[in-house]
Amino acid sequence: MSLSVKHLLGIKELQTQDIEQIFQTADNFKQVLQRQIKKVPALRDTTVVNLFFENSTRTRISFELAEKRLSADTVNFSASGSSVSKGETLIDTVNNILAMKVDMIVMRHSASGAPWFLAQHVDASIINAGDGTNEHPTQALLDAYSIREKLGDLKGKRVTIIGDIMHSRVALSNIFCLNKLGAEVTVSGPPTLIPKYIEDLGVRVEYDVKKALQWCEVANVLRIQLERQHKPLFSTLREYSLYYGINKQMLDSLQKEILIMHPGPINRGVELNSDVADSANSIILDQVENGVAIRMAVIYLLSGKTALGE
Amino acid sequence: MKTLLDHKQLDITLQRLAHQLVENHLNFQDTAIIGIQPRGIWLSSRIAELVRKITGQKNIDYGMLDITFYRDDVHQGDIHVPSLTDINFSIENRNVVLIDDVLHTGRTIRSAMDALIDFGRPKKVELMVLIDRRFSRELPIQPDYAGRIVDTIITQKVKVYWAEKDQKDEVVLID
């Protein structure tokens, strides 16, 4: 038994049974993380490099903890302060690192498709930790895993993704993942932030946030990514918050309880109010906790392929 | 294929193993029984049940230990599927009886001891197996309680069937 892929580039390439297998393995690691000694020696013989060409707190720490708790050796790399600023190409950077006997690469890059490009040119297993506006597979896995933990099997569950769908790799990976697991997905937000033809991915579009919330059991609220908006797509943050921000009053008016998720970092008072982010409905910190177990599972399941030299 | 233990013989052997265990652990308050996943748990659950019957103590600590992440062959061949670990009691300063069905190279037990120690520092660890394939050890590990000692060659296989899982109680040697 093993995953059907050598790399975790995107959810798009995964089979449903791969996702199930990652979840089952994550169940075991979650148990390990609740012990006093939160560590197993499984990957003593593996070295992982974390290549972060783009800023990150949560994902990088989460990956690093996952690697350490599997007993892998880790090397961290961030683009600032490296030879990338001297003009070294991606392949050269990576091949130089691999020459120092590294087995696995975790990479975040601002260019969509960068991990696919790299996978064609190097032998090591690659885990995509977010590429541009394309995919963020481990986030989607931990999101689905967190929903499964609270609500059980995802089949038929209704999930609304709210906010900047256009620039969000979290949204795209979540759509692929939830679809594969049989959940129904609605996207909601300002029309300027919802890509045309997104229905072709098998999702509903609902521009009225209130209606979208009324429909769902889980709302995944995304961060407004001002750094990726090269032209203004809504007038002000205040206006966005007024029409699309989620607050307690809005949730109370639904007459039902829904789960609130957010991939972080939260812009408090913009897409999510503090009275919701810190409420009992919020499973934001469960997501973060599950992130380590999910990443341990992915690294563990892919590590076999590296060592076998496939 | 040769039958090593049939249903009746297996029953007698389990009775003996349970009695030996009680003989050595008069006060089961200080002892916990832990079966090794995946195949050791069938033996361990039977032994735990017998010990409860013999001693009349209902609340004997019984757990299951998965050793997948502690194996020394994680990256040889296919990745192994982990099973459930369930140890909801402290093993600190207590006697632990590890139980597995077949003792062969000793590598599983080595991993199990590593896994166990991550839960605390037991006072003493003992090993019980149903079948001891002696002369095939790759590590210096010996059982404290053995159901049946057999001499086998490496190409042979010992298979233990349990009624709970395999619809029959039987131990066979396959050539």
Image (cartoon, coloured by chain):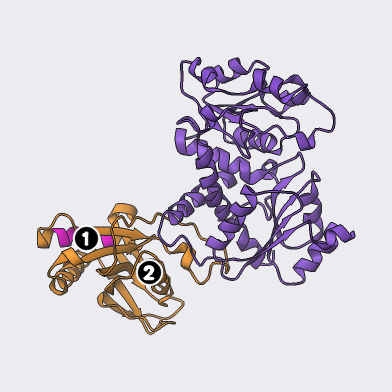
Chain colours: A purple, B orange
Residue under pointer 2: B117
Query: The residue marked by circle 2 belongs to what chain?
Result: B
Instruction: Mark 2: give few (<14), some (14-19) or many (20+) Cα within 10 Å.
Output: few
Q: Which mark is residue A49?
A: none
Quarter containing the N terminus of chain A: bottom right
- Asked which secondary structure carries label 1, the reply is helix
Q: Is residue A46 above or below residue A244?
A: below
The amino acid at mark 1 is Ala
Residue A142 is covered by the magenta coloring: no
Q: How many marks?
A: 2
Task: Give residue B8's position: percent from left, percent from top.
Answer: 19, 64
Residue under pointer 1: B48
Q: CA distance from mark 1 to mark 2?
A: 21 Å
Q: Is residue A240 left or right of residue A31?
A: right
Q: Is residue A149 above or below residue A36?
A: above
The amino acid at mark 2 is Ile
Q: Is residue A196 left or right of residue A286?
A: right
Query: Upstream in the sequence, badge 1 or badge 2?
Result: 1
- Asked which secondary structure carries label 2, the reply is helix
For this rendering, which residue is in front, B4 or A132?
A132
Task: Give residue A244's position: percent from left, percent from top.
Answer: 65, 21
Assign the magenta stretch its main secondary structure: helix
Task: Give residue A30's position: percent from left, percent from top.
Answer: 47, 51
- The magenta segment is B44-52
Instruction: Residue A64: name its quadrant.
Output: bottom right
Q: Mark 1, mark 2: which one is toward the viewer?
A: 2
Is residue A300 visible in the rendered structure shown here? no
> Can marks 1 and 2 be said to lie on one chain?
yes
Instruction: Mark 1: give few (<14), some (14-19) or many (20+) Cα within 10 Å.
Output: many
For this rendering, which residue is in front, A136 or A266?
A266
